[in-house]
Image (cartoon, grey):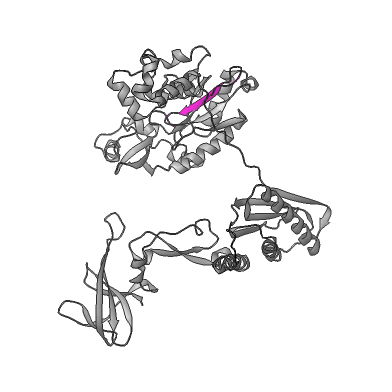
Amino acid sequence: MLGPKDGGGAPRFEEAPGESRARHTGASAAGAPPPPCFEHTRAQSFRDRPLILFAEVRRNLHVTACSREAVQLGVRPGMPLGEARSLLPTTSSRRPRRPVGKPVFQRADPAADRTRLQALALHCQRYSPLAGAEDGLAPESLWLDISGSEALFGGERGLVEAVRTDLAQQGIQVRIAIADSWGTAWAVSHFGESVVSLVAADEQATALEPLPVAALRVSDTVIDSLQSLDVTTVGRLMKLPRASLPSRFGKELVRRLDQALGLVPELLTAERSIEPVRAEWLFDEPVLDRQALDHVCELLLDRILAAISVQRAALRELTCHWLGTTIEPVSLRLLRPTTDRRHLLELLRLQCERCVFTSGVTGVRMEVVEMGLPCIRQGLLFDDDVEEEYTRSLAELVDRLSSRIGRQSVLRSNLQSDPLPERSCHCVPWLNAHAVTEGTHVIPSRLRCRPLRLLRVPQSLPVEHYSRDGFPCWVEKSSVVCVSGPERIETGWWRDLDVKRDYYRLDLANGARLWAFCDLSSGRWFLHGLF
């Protein structure tokens, strides 16, 4: 099991129960820079610098994890972010005993943490074929079922040292506990005194007795109820009459206690490595014939489509390598996943036409980089779904244009959540991963008052005459017939530029309709769009 300890950001390991003393190992990282969401290469720049992760909790920013350097300065998880800033040497008048680097503040990213833990679980499969992240919304630990694997490392002690040395090379400090049940391993690694704990088969209850009731992984409500009765440790809890526990504290407490003691099995999900989908064709002699290469690519593509059809998936990105040459691999990315053989062959041939072979090709290897779910459409009584046909045709057109003129030349507009109109939309490549996601939801009624043509940079509006109310009455050699508005847009103090604008729609006598604003700071008028 991998997870932070005492405000640290490093992982931990533990073990789970099984037949013939199945052992689960769990490791918990204690204040190791970086936390699980950071790669080892990035950790080198954070070394010897206080690292604080924070998140919004009940509308306030609180510290969720911190490095060992931050703990030495008095920072603790759960502390308000403002209080943590006051303890750091850059914002505090007192100086630390030893010089420390500039503090680093990062917003916590639970999704990145989970992804990093899953990758670390796959890495730990070299010690056990069954390894995975703990269940929950915010996992912080890894579990390994080491039943029979410890013999390959000279026993449980040898396995522990191998794991610690391996993870220490990645910049991760861990706490490891080995027990017959996952609950005991989790509890000892999180709340035990030793960095490495090996719990014997008949000593699980003894190891749990001095630990707090929070080690049983129960909810905060149950913990508060137990502490109100002065039941602060697991040992005191086990002395209470078992028959009265469900009615007083709920069934969750009894279930967690039995899981920790190994009386009730606990199902854990192991991570599975995804086998790459690839196909390869090796020639007896180097080949330069274009028709032969095209035929081989067609055969390999058929094998790829047959392989992903078994997984009920569709092709999103594909690469084709020319073995024995220095030619760059052909990369093929699609707007949406597809299994259309005709469309894929057409795009593949467009890419292969650009390859100039100066030496013979000894083989062709084709592999899938990314897969996706195929487009599923409900069957209709009358097949007249014009919208689906337009969507498919648009996707094929974008794929062909991107293959011919490059991905960076085929763009689409993407909405952003920004109050400034000139920053609320930007162009991104169609085939980018983030470009195909849904944009920011915009209320249609707000779009009606915005012009279709927006200037990239607001231009100064020459106003010849003003009315008594301060509105333009003569612009662009034409009188202003109607003024509609205002729509006020202001930016916060934390941005690089403080903007205060009142937008109006100006209807001119010559038929033009302008979208202009008045800068409240200077009183000047600017033209920003045309209706």
The extreme front residue here reads 381
Please say if 275 is above or below 527: above
Q: Nearer the viewer, residue 407 or 217?
A: 217
Q: Work out which quarter of the rendered image holds the C terminus and state it.
A: bottom left
Relative placement, left or right, of 431 versus 346 is left
Relative placement, left or right, of 468 versus 375 is left
Please say if 294 is above or below 100: below
Magenta range is: 13-32
Q: Residue at x 44, y 35 (%)?
A: 33
Determine if the magenta segment contains residue 21.
Answer: yes
Could one spot residue 468 in this view of the protein?
A: yes
Q: Residue at x 49, y 20 (%)?
A: 196
Residue 313 in the image: state x and y as whole percent.
63, 51
Determine if the magenta segment contains residue 407.
Answer: no
Magenta stretch, overall SS: loop
Could one spot residue 325 in this view of the protein?
A: no
Residue 1 in the image: state x and y as whole percent.
50, 29
Residue 524 in the image: state x and y as whole percent.
24, 73
